[in-house]
Amino acid sequence: MGAGYCVIGLEQTSPDSFCSTRPLPPKAFAWREPFPFKRGDSIYFEPVPTVAKRPHIEDQQCNGLQPTDRSLGEAELVECLRKAEFSSTLEYLFECQPQSSSGGGRAVWVNPQEAKRSICGCEYDNIRFRLFPERDGFNLRAKLALASGERLDSIPIVDREWCRFAGSLVQRIKRSDPLPLAERFMNRSVANKLCATLKRFARIGLPRPRGDQQCWLMQDSLFPQPNSFWLDEI
Amino acid sequence: MVMAGDWDHSRAVDLVNKCVSREMRPGIPLPGDSVDLVNTGLIDLMGWVGILTAIEDETGIQTFGNLWPEGQSQSIGSLVAEIVRFKIARKCEFVGARTPEPANSNIGISLVGWGHAVGSLRIGATAIQAECNLAAGTISERAGIESVARVDGNESELTLAQHATEIALQTANLDPEKEDLLVVTSATHLGFPSLAATLHIRLLLREPCCALDVGGACVGVIYALATAKALLLATRQNVALVVASEVNSRRFLSPSVPGEFRGLFGDGACAFVLARSDSVKGDENLRLGDFIWGCDGTSSAALRLSLHETGTVEVQFKGEQLAKAAALHLGRILEGLETLAGSPRTSVDYFAIHEPNPRLVQVISQNSQIPMDKIAQVCKSFGNLGSATCGVGLSKALSKTRASRTAEHRPLIFVAAVGPGLLWGGTYLH
């Protein structure tokens, strides 16, 4: 993942179905600051001819994003996402078999030559968060129990709102070593809130392939979205 | 997994070298001990996380990744140093690693968490009688059932088990990742992956946490407790989760199941957290005692259930014969538990027994001279919950006695059940 915003949207293809589209700036994969849109905003863009490389078949270059006066709330957005690419099994997420790291790690990857798309939604039944320390902060990851009875054991969360929420949480904990406490709060309080709702939905995405021909699965969106009021429980 | 106490410097070096080489590109030699793996681009952050989680799995240091000091070099040398340092400084916090048996072993198994959940629907006796084409009073008067608990369309053995387990873990103040063993019993969950595997996944337990299923039907929870206790002692692991979950309403939905049998059953689950404990130290947690069990084949024809080729359940149910055998054996189990626990039943605070139906509970109470208020009477409101019946009774008893429990005064609870076979089993907690 490079710097900037990787934007993925939905295009309505029939009254009851959507497909994902990823508007790209002319010469990059991400939109730079200032980026004036928020999740759920309806935007308009004029596509330009694009050669999308598998598995990022949703790529669509354009010259800019224009606002409209419409914006979807979270519930409405999730409803639309459920009508877009959706899988009830791990294998169908990208229509190929995810592979475990041969090194024994818990993250999984797919071969970009085999994957048929780079984004897909799924339902989950349980979640546990991990916050791994990194030089510049932390790496937010999750274990997900999917509704299919399968599980993803170590998937990085790149959802902007969740990363910001976790960052705010860590900042609020006035300790030299805040991550264990933050992780406990995420798993006891926040995860319980997520599991108590029926709106549990995640969008799993693939990054751009690098030299190793492995696209590691990542969590692009996690619903419900975090609520800053939850932090008041600390 | 190796024992926590086994980690010395050379062993830590071997492990770290193994974990690091797995994450590096093939053909690249291992760098020197002080080379920063991430800064030099030998591995990326995904690989670093892979190394940390692999070390967690191998050593049982569950929080190894969290403990990584900010700003410390991400090198082989520092990984080795952290493993050795952790072993010396925080050996007692190893989770999942086996605890060495102390000299003059006096280890016991304590029940530190419990919970139960039943189906969210309540079906009154009158409605059950109508549904099962039974004469008025068959369920309400003859069996004494007021209502049964049933699942709704969103509930299953898995969701009930999950709910009960979450309550049990909350009671124990434990995270799911502390569990080393998961022992599950269910007579109604048919198919693979088994309920233990499915629940393991749903609860997001650690991969090295053992998941296994045991049978026994209505005695299942006692057999599961016995299995968990034995495994905790034999493997010297620390924490086990025991779960029973039944959704009878779906399994017995077939028209081939007699209404007077089907109408007795409800849906529910129970869960218990067991932990190794040093019995020299006093605490308020109840210790799981010894077990008695057996199988009396003379009554085996009183209840037979089988799956027909078409998948429907076929039931052979001789109610009167089964009731007599059940009452007889439950009485015998209580006698056996008196001997085992070294305490007369008059000193028992609660009886968590299998409850086929409330009338039979009354008979057992009279025959065995047990006051009714010392029995949970689960089946009156929820119906016969199969393996979960005596477990829900135990869960209720534990909640009831929690406030008054001290290290000096721990209540005595007898647990007894019978099931098809006729299988029987019992244990006690004190």
Image (cartoon, grey):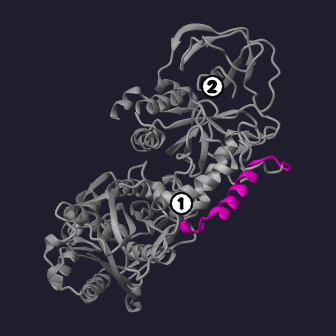
> What's drawn in magenta, residue-wise?
B1-28
- From the viewer's side, name the closer residue of A37 and A34: A34
Binning the other alpha carbons within 10 Å of mark 1 as few (below 14), some (14 to 19) or many (20 upward) gives: many
Q: Position of residue A189 (x, y in %)?
A: 39, 41
Chain of the residue that carries numbered disc 2 in the rendered image = A
Q: Tell me if label 1 and label 2 are in contact, CB under 8 Å.
A: no
Residue at 73% in and 21% down: A29
Q: Position of residue B333 (x, y in %)?
A: 29, 85
Q: Secondary structure at mark 2?
A: strand
Residue at 70% in and 25% down: A2
- From the viewer's side, name the closer residue of A229 and A20: A229
Per the image, the residue denoted by label 2 is: A18
Per the image, the residue denoted by label 1 is: B87
Q: Amino acid at mark 1?
A: Lys
Q: Quadrant of residue A206?
A: top right
Tell me if I can see residue B134 in this picture: no
Q: Is residue B30 above or below residue B328?
A: above
Q: Secondary structure at mark 1?
A: helix
Q: Is residue A161 left or right of residue A185?
A: right
Q: Position of residue B312 (x, y in %)?
A: 50, 67
| Position of the C terminus of chain B by quadrant | bottom left
Q: Residue furthest bottom?
A: B298
